[in-house]
Image: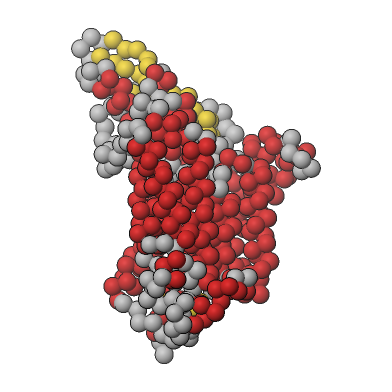
Amino acid sequence: MTTNSTIRSRAAEEVSAASGALFRIGFGIIGVILVFRFFARGWIESLLIEPAYHFSYPGFEWVRVWPEPWMHVHFLVIGLAALGIALGYHYRLSAALFALSLGYVELIDRSLYLNHYYWVVLTAGVMVFLPLNAAYSLDARRGRVRTPGSYPAWVIWMLRFQVGMVYVFAGLAKLNGDWLLRAEPLSTWLPARSDMWLIGPVLTLPVVAYLFSWAGAFFDLTIVAWLSWRPARPYAYVALVVFHTLTWLMFPSIGVFPLLMSLSALVFFDPAWPEHFLPQERSDVRRGGPKGRRGSFGARHPLEPAWIGVGAIYVLIMIALPLRHHLTPGDVKWTGEGYLGSWQVMLSEKSASADFIVTDPATGKTWTVPPPEYLTERQQMVMATDPVMIRQTARLIADDLGGHVEVAADVRLSFNGRMSRPFTDPEVVISEAPLTEGIEGFILAQPSG
């Protein structure tokens, strides 16, 4: 039997749906928590409703904030969809509604991009095509699933890929001089946590930043392999939980990401492992559902060529997107080109100041416009490090002043502990440039050293 045939045979072999069900339940609960945080912290108002301007993604300029009270209703829909995922109630519809509604929110403002929200939207979209309601779900109890209690092994493989790609690409991104040779940005961040209980004084030692940087790179690059090796799996998972707990304690602003990844990584264990602590459902899973149909563990499930093709295309896209920045000149952490979707997780510390230089060609008059006249404080901080948002701000100012003026940007950027340096060329007019235009001649080269 050829290698290809062996892989297809193993992918078609049916396995217990218990692990995937636990993934679904945890994912849905975290989705509810995300929505609760938006309500409790007033983020719907402060991040979405109150700003007078939102940075759109090229091609998605039509995405807008709903007028009140519909933005709050929109988040209620997200929460209900997440609850539907957790309960396995009309699961596929709930997953699709969750992915689309949360994705809509993420597309409203580019300055709100976060890696873990991006991952949540992607994963919800993938879940629409995975039968994760085959066990421990209301759909299974009501006979709405075709093969209760089991599904083909490729389903769990896809979940493992979805989780594993975050670690692998985050590890590859750490293979750079700043992270390994300068221990940045941890050399900047860790001393600021000197007030932490017990370990605070230790974090101020320079050697600790290097130790954490190298350990972090090793962890991200190898954890998927350790989790995939059965003898090492329990120890690797303990290390994963400790790692994410420490990062959350030191950087609480990362929110639910540590919990999200700690729960999601459980898919690397044997597909049937949750049955050991969920005995009330075990008989249903083994028999093939509450109606007592016999399960088919060990049987083969035919793989449709069309689904193989769709899955392969998705995997290739998810591999290509994080690597696309290698096709553009400069360091992605400096230029920002190819940053979104590349899993550059906590790799840079940036602070920037920006002014926009306005020139009236008819009169030759030149003056400076500060961003606070148009943007919130948070938007200003993110905008000044992103070429697309800098261009959008220049265009916003030009349009507000009648459209007949020329606008350039004077941005200075401090990057990973370095002194502030010029980031943009203030002589280049950018208010009329397409948002998708390259950065050559606009973003200055990163200084060496």
Residue 50 image offset from top left, x and y in percent: 40, 27
Q: Quadrant of residue 249?
A: top right
Q: In the rendered image of this protein, does residue 145 appear above or below residue 95?
A: below
Residue 390 image offset from top left, x and y in percent: 37, 30
> What's the residue at 41%, 53% (across, down)?
81
> What's the residue at 51%, 61% (across, down)?
25
Residue 103 image offset from top left, x and y in percent: 37, 48
Q: Quadrant of residue 219?
A: bottom right
Q: Quadrant of the C terminus?
A: top right
Please indicate, yes or no, whether residue 309 appears anywhere in the rendered image.
yes
Q: Quadrant of residue 113?
A: top left
Residue 242 located left or right of residue 58? right
Residue farthest to the bottom, as pictured: 1
Q: In the rendered image of this protein, does residue 218 appear above or below residue 255?
A: below
> What's the residue at 33%, 65% (across, down)?
313
Q: Quadrant of the N terminus?
A: bottom left
Q: In the rendered image of this protein, does residue 376 appear above or below residue 276?
A: above
State the count of labels: 0
> What's the residue at 39%, 73% (across, down)?
143
